[in-house]
Image: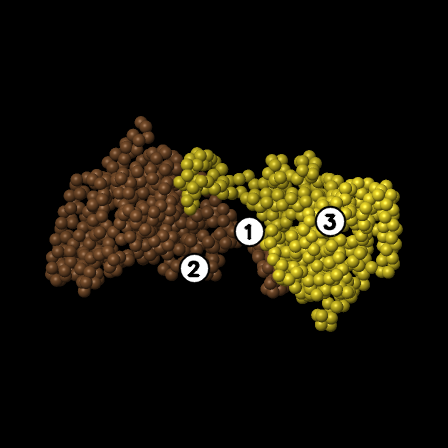
Chain colours: A brown, B yellow
């Protein structure tokens, strides 16, 4: 088999696994029919003028078998006096399900029934140039654009790209992943002649790419200067559909795409499940990388808010460790069994014994204070020395081991602790090295996470 | 005593020590009379048309007692067919002294007699706008400018500034020091109303200063962009008299000047001679700074050439150690007993156990080579990981101790070894830590140098 044949074979094999069967489709269709008729009635009873539209991957036939979502939008006229809140109250009265009120940038109802996730989202009629009233007002237009522009049969290609991104941990615009949304995946397929393989083949050009769907469209570059990838929303040129995609996630996708083309395998779509054997536990214990973990309680928060806080905490921690010269390698978190575990890998076990302290230039009056302070201190091992045109001292410092360094950072507020995480010293537990590996080895999910974290490489490069 | 009175007292005390006595002056005068009359005769005999002029600090009455130099210039007409070499040959015939032929940027004769250093330097008549024929053609004009512009009595102020610079190791334009020449000292005194104290008081403005002696003179800044201090030669506006002054030496002077004004003492002019006691040897042994020294043979070279090569070697060594993450603090050399000893201070004893290796960006074809190389290597402890948009690996490295690191650098030509220094492995000796301190303690000069180097601070900050 040449490469192209192997790509084709793998795509067929993947589709076999992810293409929904007739039965699944019928199940979703009947569930939608049932709920939408109840919805119509509820609206009528409440005398609310609004139209119902099925959106999301089910409506576009781009969902992946097993991911059973029905996203129903209730579109109010732009001038409607009803608020999303009013609407959701009426619906809860009319349809008896175990509704959970959720709130992203917009309020919505969520329920699970017959293994299907139902979402009901109120919004207002969208019109270009008019201010949107709710964050999801554009969604019906997105569907319209995709329906009109996605070539026939390319819904299967969307499925392939989604699964590829799932397998390479780049799918999902949520904060935890900072990756590609379903709509963005569809746009990328449209942009590559409807072909999954073309998206992969063009991937190397995605870093800092600018994609539009209208010719001669002038992009307001200044507005998107912090974005790694710009894909202008064909239904609203003021919006970058890819604004959630972080450089790191984009780079991960680009690398995965190219690696797949070079060396195709099913593992890009379905990562190997690696069994953590005693040998692998020993490998972890033998690693020259230094590990510690902070165990803290999982607060009840919407996913995006929780991960927003966690990612902020990780970033602050990384910066603090970097400043303290203990050379952080990676900080990442896992949520499992109502616990959050923030894992820290560093090169060094402790901060250095000697550290420079930079003083003022020799022609500034502030030098006297510096010289007074350091001329006779015992911890000065070299200096005050003039290096370049500044005074500097090399100080002997008490070294802090990673565990104590983290404790100090928390105790002395050296890093900003996000308000919703319980990171007080008495609420957390810090476990390091062998103790940590031993404790993790009792939990398959955790030990696999740690093993992958310690290897540092993408799943598709992990062997055996 | 207020500060101004203390300055005055110290200046008087210093002048008492450095002002030449009547006897010394008479000795130099008679020696000059004797040699110049012999010179006149030698020129006559050889039928060489030239005039004789006494230059240098003796001619300006700015020399410091004990520094007995007579600099005699023989000025040939610009069109003269005689070369400096011809001239020097005739002089050697005419005056019987133990002449040494020397060569800086120009050839000259050098002899010592009655404890006086005699230099005879041929040059050509200088005229502004005409190309100079020898590097010292401007010297007679320098003397003329100083004679005309140095206020009466300010020759004593020149002596003070010279001695201050000697005491703070900033005097001398030679490569070893990269400091202030005698002519530059005289110009600085003229520029500060003829007063030594004014030069110190204005010192903080010297960093990146531009000094001229003609009003409205436009400086060709581009030409001097690498110079830390610009003092335009009043006899030739194309020349920066301060071009030899390195930023480091200038900063040392600025700091010393301000420290003197703040806390005046004789020690700025005459540094304390510190006795290396057993306690100080113990202090050196207890230092947390890591020390090694390379012992190599002193080649027979003119000072500027030797130090040019040494400073280049030190710089290359520093860069190499920095690149290898052993954190160099200082590299400096001492020449004593026909040996050169290059001393190296570092923060770390060895190179790190872990080191990052940065690979190509994820969208470049060179990534395959990198991934092939590192995907299965045992020394990879983390990665190949995608960090930002690049592949990186963290490698486990064999740590090199400073001694071996230096040996490797020399063996593997990792630093440029200046051609005139004998730095082959078999010619050098590397001695570290206690062994070095023990060996140095046998020699007063060396142990004092090492003690000061290890303290890292200017002499005037050293106590007891």
Does residue B433 appear anywhere in the picture? no
Q: Are marks 2 and 3 in contact (CB under 8 Å)?
A: no
When the figure is inspected, residue A116 is found, relative to residue B270, above or below; the finding is above
**Residue at horizontal 60 percent and vertical 48 percent from the top:** B328
Q: Position of residue B248 (x, y in %)?
A: 64, 54
Q: Position of residue B130 (x, y in %)?
A: 69, 49
Q: Which residue is mark 1?
A: A352
- Report in which chain the residue with disc 3 lies: B
Badge 3 local density, few (<14 within 10 Å), some, or many (20+)? some
**Residue at horizontal 25 percent and vertical 58 percent from the top:** A129
Q: Which residue is mark 2?
A: A416
Asked if badge 3 and badge 1 are on a common chain, one would say no
Local secondary structure at mark 2: loop
Please state which of residues B247 and B294 is positioned toward the viewer in this rendering.
B247
Q: Position of residue A455 (x, y in %)?
A: 42, 41
Mark sitting on residue B136: 3
């Amino acid at each position: 088999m040449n490469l192209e044949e192997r790509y084709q074979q793998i795509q067929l094999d993947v589709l076999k696994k992810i293409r929904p069967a007739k039965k699944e489709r019928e199940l979703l269709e009947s569930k939608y029919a049932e709920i939408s008729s109840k919805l119509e009635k509820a609206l009528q009873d409440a005398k609310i003028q609004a139209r119902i539209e099925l959106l999301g991957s089910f409506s576009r036939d781009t969902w992946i078998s097993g991911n059973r979502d029905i996203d129903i939008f209730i579109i109010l006229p732009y001038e409607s006096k009803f608020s999303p809140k009013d609407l959701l109250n009426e619906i809860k009265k009319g349809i008896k399900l175990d509704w959970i009120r959720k709130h992203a940038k917009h309020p919505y109802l969520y329920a699970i029934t017959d293994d299907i996730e139902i979402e009901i989202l109120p919004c207002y009629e969208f019109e270009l140039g008019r201010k949107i009233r709710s964050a999801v007002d554009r969604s019906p237009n997105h569907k319209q654009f995709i329906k009109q522009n996605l070539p026939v049969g390319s819904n299967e290609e969307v499925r392939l790209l989604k699964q590829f991104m799932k397998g390479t941990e780049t799918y999902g615009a949520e904060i935890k992943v900072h990756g590609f949304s379903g709509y963005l995946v569809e746009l990328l397929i449209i942009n590559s002649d409807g072909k999954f393989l073309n998206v992969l083949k063009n991937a190397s050009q995605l870093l800092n790419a600018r994609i539009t769907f209208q010719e001669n469209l002038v992009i307001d570059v200044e507005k998107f200067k912090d974005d790694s990838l710009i894909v202008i929303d064909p239904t609203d040129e003021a919006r970058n559909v890819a604004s959630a995609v972080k450089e790191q996630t984009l780079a991960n996708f680009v690398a995965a795409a190219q690696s797949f083309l070079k060396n195709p395998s099913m593992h890009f779509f379905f990562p190997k499940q690696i069994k953590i054997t005693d040998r692998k536990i020993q490998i972890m214990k033998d690693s020259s990388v230094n590990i510690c973990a902070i165990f803290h309680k999982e607060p009840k928060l919407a996913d995006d808010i929780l991960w927003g806080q966690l990612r902020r905490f990780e970033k602050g921690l990384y910066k603090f460790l970097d400043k303290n010269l203990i050379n952080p390698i990676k900080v990442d978190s896992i949520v499992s069994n109502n616990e959050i575990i923030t894992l820290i890998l560093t090169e060094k076990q402790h901060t250095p014994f000697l550290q420079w302290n930079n003083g003022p230039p020799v022609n500034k009056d502030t030098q006297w204070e510096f010289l007074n302070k350091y001329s006779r201190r015992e911890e000065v091992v070299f200096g005050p020395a003039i290096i370049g045109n500044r005074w500097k001292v090399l100080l002997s410092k008490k070294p802090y081991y990673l565990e104590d360094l983290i404790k100090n950072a928390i105790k002395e507020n050296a890093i900003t602790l996000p308000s919703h995480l319980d990171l007080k010293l008495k609420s957390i537990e810090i476990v390091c090295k062998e103790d940590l590996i031993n404790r993790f080895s009792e939990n398959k999910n955790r030990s696999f996470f740690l093993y992958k974290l310690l290897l540092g490489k993408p799943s598709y490069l992990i062997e055996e």
